[in-house]
Image (cartoon, helix red, strand yellow):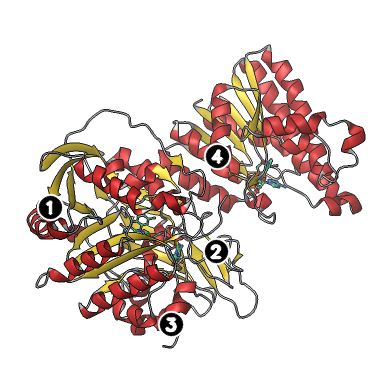
């Protein structure tokens, strides 16, 4: 993987993945909404690896801007070998229950916007007949729970979209990777009390880079979430609905 | 999961709030009225210098970016939460090494400045602070200061060794040292007692950039203070061999019986007898040479829930070798010592830091499992010998010295105090500033 585009590059997880990819010698095109943060990360990556690093700004709610910024990435890099889509936000579930605007914001950031990027990326890689698309979804998308079902619905929708896309692109030599992190210690979870289930952004970022290199399909990060989610997915609905999760 | 304890896990945390880092160019976050904050790096300080009980800490892990590198001069600029381990990963392959490194690579740039750390090359290179060209300091009044010997000089000198009390260090510009290989030409010399140690030290320190000794704390009589003198210079030869990267986490809280004196004695014996001839030369990778303990992550948990003390002193020895002998006698007699005692001579290169610990003499560092009162009494006893010898105790490793001992160890504390940020404090600082 020589040339990689990262959308939502300033996310703590994506930044760690970018460091791992840069150390492997990849040139990077970083897309993020905050140009100060983007420049800071780009400077870091240049010192660490001497890599070629470009940046561009985007805003998740500008759904039609996705193809424009990806075109920009393609012309800067020449071609794209892999893409990582990482942006997302964790909304306040109670606020989403009472205020559609809050729910809509979260659905756009976590589902619509990644879907917009994936439309361009899918067609680009389909034409190229090789490459990898990796997206950070979440274990929260594996089953709806009362404590975060708006976020869960967006991530669940994203997971399903990626299943379909993987199926479509498998016939064209392109791998599609779904990363499902559990709890990760990042700015997104700054307000949540940390317990033993929390992983570091570094561990999840490195795992993400590894999955991209290998073109894996579905990756729980860290791996112990696979059996946990297997159980959670299989609890019968008549019991599940009574739990406080 | 980070618990924000200190490395010695003593004293225990009580009601310590964790505050987020300010985003770049923003003011510091503040704890509730009347409380103070303290930066927290990687928590590799042993005692209470990196904790702020009843108040708040600001972990600096988010200050993780490199900013710039000048490959001609070997000057790196990075945010203050970048660890020495990361600097090694990035720059050793390009032929640059840290100017000064402690016995673990898991410390941050900010932490290295705040304790003005020293390493095996103190006799040649002085402390870490001497190699810090400049840094940014964020104060609680919102002001950002750039500090260097020529800009804000007094604040620069107060912050080097300033125990995290003068503000939050945000970025650091550090001079690296060129190396031709990640390997060192090393020499290990066995010494039978402390007199031999001093003789070897005097002779070999001139020949080697790096030196340190491991001493057996269980032998008495004419074998008092026997051990291994280990020295090296970066090699110009290179050896192509990939080192396996094994850092094993220490999984659980070991019961204290693991550390009974029998265990420590056998460890010492093993260590001491592993080498049959008196001198062995070798080509050694920098990892095992500088960071033998880093191979076991969280080895501090081996001491169990009660935690442990580390005790580090420096005493002059030029005219009187008996002081250190007397200290060893007390330690071995007490049978409370750990298996790991480290002995090294400091040179006389001055640090810019007002509160820098090293001073010319011989420094001894060792662990004491926390057995409560008798352990504390032993350290008080050692303090009084150090005091009579005009020596010092290292604050980065301390959890118990008296306010008086602190003032003797840090004679410029009066000059330092006015530079403290009024909204910063630490458990250590409140303890050692208590009126007698
Ligand atoms: C195995 C081992 C070996 C060691 N060997 C040596 C040695 O050989 N020589 C030596 O000198 N020390 C040694 N030490 C001690 C260690 O180097 C110091 O305690 C060091 O300061 C720890 O750095 P840290 O990043 O973990 O900081 P912490 O321990 O988290 O904090 C230390 C101090 O730095 C301050 N601080 C941290 N970051 C900032 C910042 N950004 N701005 C302002 N203040 C800040 C804190 O407030 C605190 O006062 C050793 C420790 C261990 C565990
Ligand atoms: N942390 C967890 O526990 C966890 C668990 C499962 C899945 N995830 C997923 O992992 C991914 C990365 O998150 P993270 O944990 O690394 O958190 P993070 O550091 O807070 O990253 C979130 C990223 O999303 C970007 N973003 C948010 N809203 C945006 C908008 N409207 N327009 C453009 N960009 C926007 C943020 O940009 P700024 O940098 O400019 O703020 C940031 O880059 C997310 O998809 C998240 O859902 C996280």
Q: Chain of mark 2?
A: B
Residues at marks 4 and 3 on the same chain: no
Distance, label 1 to label 4, CA atoms, is 46 Å
Under tag 1, what secondary structure?
loop
Q: Quadrant of residue B365?
A: bottom left
Residue wearing tag 2: B58
**Who's the residue at 56% across and 47% down the image?**
A38
The mark lying in front, picked from 1 and 4, is 1
Q: Residues within 10 Å of mark 4 (few under 14, many from 20)?
A: some
The mark lying in front, picked from 3 and 1, is 1
Residue wearing tag 1: B192
Residue wearing tag 3: B433
The mark lying in front, picked from 4 and 3, is 3
Residues marked 2 and 4 touching at CB (< 8 Å): no
Q: Quadrant of residue A123?
A: top right
Ligand 2 is found in the corner quadrant, namely top right
As drawn, the label of residue A203 is 4
Q: Chain of mark 1?
A: B
Under tag 3, what secondary structure?
loop
Q: Residues within 10 Å of mark 2 (few under 14, many from 20)?
A: many
**Who's the residue at 57% across and 49% down the image?**
B1
């Amino acid at each position: 993987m020589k040339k990689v585009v990262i959308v939502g590059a300033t996310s703590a997880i994506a930044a760690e993945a970018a460091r791992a990819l840069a150390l492997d010698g990849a040139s990077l095109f970083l897309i993020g909404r905050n140009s100060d943060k983007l420049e800071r990360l780009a400077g870091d990556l240049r010192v660490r690896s001497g890599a070629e690093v470009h940046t561009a700004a985007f805003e998740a709610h500008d759904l039609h801007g996705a193809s424009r910024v990806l075109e920009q990435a393609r012309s800067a890099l020449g071609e794209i070998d892999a893409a990582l889509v990482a942006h997302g936000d964790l909304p306040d579930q109670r606020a989403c229950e009472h205020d559609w605007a809050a729910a809509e914001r979260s659905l756009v950031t976590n589902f619509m916007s990644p879907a917009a990027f994936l439309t361009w990326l899918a067609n680009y890689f389909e034409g190229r007949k090789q490459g990898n698309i990796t997206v950070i979804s979440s274990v929260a998308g594996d089953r709806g729970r009362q404590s975060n079902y708006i976020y869960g619905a967006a991530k669940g929708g994203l997971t399903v979209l990626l299943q379909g896309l993987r199926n479509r692109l498998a016939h064209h030599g392109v791998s599609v990777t779904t990363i499902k992190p559990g709890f990760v210690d990042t700015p997104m979870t700054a307000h949540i009390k940390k317990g033993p289930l929390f992983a570091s952004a570094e561990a999840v970022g490195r795992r993400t880079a590894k999955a991209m290199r290998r073109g894996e399909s579905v990756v729980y990060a860290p791996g112990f979430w696979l059996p946990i989610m297997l159980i959670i997915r299989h609890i019968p609905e008549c019991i599940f609905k009574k739990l406080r999760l | 999961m980070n618990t924000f304890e200190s490395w010695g896990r003593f004293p225990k945390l009580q009601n310590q709030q964790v505050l987020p880092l300010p985003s770049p160019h923003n003011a510091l976050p503040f704890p509730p009225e009347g409380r103070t904050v303290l930066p927290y790096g990687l928590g590799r300080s042993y005692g209470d210098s990196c904790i702020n009980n009843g108040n708040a800490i600001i972990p600096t892990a988010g200050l993780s970016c490199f900013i710039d590198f000048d490959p001609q001069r070997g000057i790196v600029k990075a945010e203050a939460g970048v660890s020495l381990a990361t600097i090694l990963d990035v720059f050793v392959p390009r032929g640059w090494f840290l100017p000064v490194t402690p016995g673990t690579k898991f410390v941050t740039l900010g932490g290295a400045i705040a304790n003005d750390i020293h390493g095996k090359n103190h006799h040649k290179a002085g402390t870490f602070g001497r190699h810090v060209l400049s840094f940014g300091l964020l104060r609680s009044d919102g002001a950002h200061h750039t500090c260097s010997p020529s800009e804000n000089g007094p604040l620069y000198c107060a912050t080097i060794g300033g125990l995290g009390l003068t503000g939050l260090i945000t970025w650091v510009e550090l001079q690296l040292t060129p190396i031709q290989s990640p390997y060192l030409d090393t020499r290990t010399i066995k010494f039978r007692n402390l007199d031999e140690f001093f003789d070897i030290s005097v002779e070999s320190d001139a020949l080697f950039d790096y030196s340190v000794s491991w001493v057996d704390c269980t032998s008495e009589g004419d074998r008092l203070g026997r051990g291994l003198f280990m020295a090296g210079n970066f090699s110009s030869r290179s050896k192509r061999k990939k080192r396996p990267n094994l850092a094993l986490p220490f999984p659980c809280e070991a019961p204290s019986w693991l550390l009974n004196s029998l265990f420590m004695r056998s460890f010492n014996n093993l260590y001491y007898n592993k080498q049959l001839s008196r001198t062995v030369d070798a080509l050694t990778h920098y990892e095992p040479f500088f960071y033998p303990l880093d191979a076991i992550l969280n080895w501090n948990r081996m001491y169990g829930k009660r935690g442990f003390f580390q005790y580090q002193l420096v005493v002059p020895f030029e005219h009187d070798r008996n002081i250190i002998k007397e200290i060893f006698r007390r330690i071995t007699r007490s049978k409370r010592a750990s298996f790991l005692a480290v002995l090294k001579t400091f040179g006389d290169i001055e640090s810019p830091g007002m509160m820098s610990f090293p001073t010319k003499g011989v420094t001894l560092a060792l662990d004491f499992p926390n057995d409560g009162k008798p352990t504390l009494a032993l350290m008080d006893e050692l303090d009084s010998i150090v005091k009579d010898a005009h020596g010092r105790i290292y604050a980065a490793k301390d959890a118990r010295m008296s306010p008086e001992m602190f003032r003797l160890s840090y004679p410029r504390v009066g000059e330092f105090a006015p530079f403290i940020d009024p909204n910063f404090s630490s458990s250590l600082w409140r303890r050692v500033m208590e009126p007698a």
